[in-house]
Image: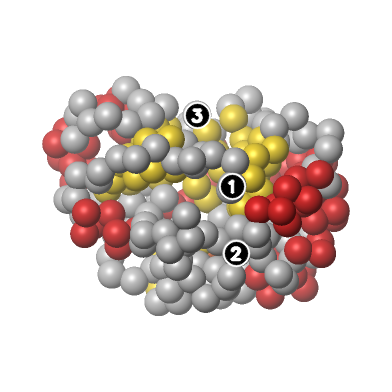
Amino acid sequence: MSIVYGPVPSWRLDRSLGIDLLPGRGKTCCFDCIYCQLGITTRPEAERSEFVALSALTKELRAVKGVAADYVTFSGTGEPTLALNLGRAIDMARRELGLPVAVLTNSALMSREDVRQELSKADVVVAKLDAPDERLFRLINRPVVDLSLKDIVDGIRRFRSGWSGRLALQMMFVSGNRGAARDMARMARELAPDEVQVNTPRRRCPVAPLPKEELDAIREEFDGIETVVTAYDRVPPAIEPLDVAETRRRRPESSRR
Ligand code: SF4
């Protein structure tokens, strides 16, 4: 299989069966985040296109029918909203597997109407937001194309106001944006997500994670938001992926459990 991988243990989505709509070698993304577990962005991209045929996805989904999973999750080796067939793939995954669908997005293309419309087909959208201003956005997420944080935040706001599914904001904290937690909490309150995930890089990457005590302190800044979880709150379930090599390519093993 080259599109479907996992299931992987997720502290946010329990047993998560992954779908990678950008499954070539290397990483296809419009960011090059300093903490990315996938290495550098080898295929910088901001234009949407079809990277895999839906007929190939159908075949792989049928091969994993009945697998024990809690969610089918669009993620993988890059930014899933770059896939022009994301909306149709979401419909297909739900139809074939009967599981709730989650999409992990870096939020970069949420300023686009077509992307918001396709994301609205999911049950859960986890949207990345790591910075409260353009300077930190460039420092942490290192966009590889011309993108503005203001447009991204506006896209998330529009998505929230027109969609009643579960929206989680994922905020990755490292030493560079640790001091911006209060401003990020203010942004989060304005965007009214159902949940904020206070994260820190716990898989192998060039950036050190913040310790539990620091994430607990950051969480305190988010008062007024109903659900705030940190990366240290939940122990992901122990599960074995169907194809270890294909799964490790998307999810390198954690060196910091
Ligand atoms: S958005 Fe995700 S895939 Fe893209 S560089 Fe950042 S962490 Fe990596």
Q: Earlier in the sequence, mark 2 or mark 3?
A: 3
Q: Residues within 10 Å of mark 2 (few under 14, many from 20)?
A: many
Alpha carbons under labels 2 and 1: distance apart: 11 Å
Q: Residue 197, how many percent across, how many down? A: 64, 44
The answer to whether 93 is drawn above or below residue 30 in the figure is above
Front disc: 1 or 3: 1
Q: Quadrant of residue 230?
A: top right
Alpha carbons under labels 2 and 3: distance apart: 29 Å
- Front residue of 81 and 226: 226
The answer to whether 87 is drawn above or below residue 27 in the figure is above
Q: Residue 90, how many percent across, how many down? A: 38, 36
Read off the residue under disc 1. Answer: 232
Q: Amino acid at mark 2?
A: Pro
Residue at point 48% right, 33% down?
122
- Front residue of 42 and 235: 235
Q: Is residue 250 visible?
A: yes
Residue at point 60% right, 58% down?
200
Q: Secondary structure at mark 1?
A: loop
Front disc: 2 or 3: 2
Q: Amino acid at mark 3?
A: Asp
Residue at point 83% right, 47% down?
221
Alpha carbons under labels 1 and 3: distance apart: 24 Å
Q: Which mark is residue 209?
A: 2
Q: Which mark is residue 56?
A: none
Q: Amino acid at mark 1?
A: Tyr
Read off the residue under disc 3. Answer: 123
* In-image side of 103 versus 72 (left or right): right
Q: Residues within 10 Å of mark 3 (few under 14, many from 20)?
A: some
Residue at point 21% right, 26% down?
66
Which color scheme does this rendered protein use? secondary structure
Q: Secondary structure at mark 3?
A: loop
- Front residue of 66 and 198: 198
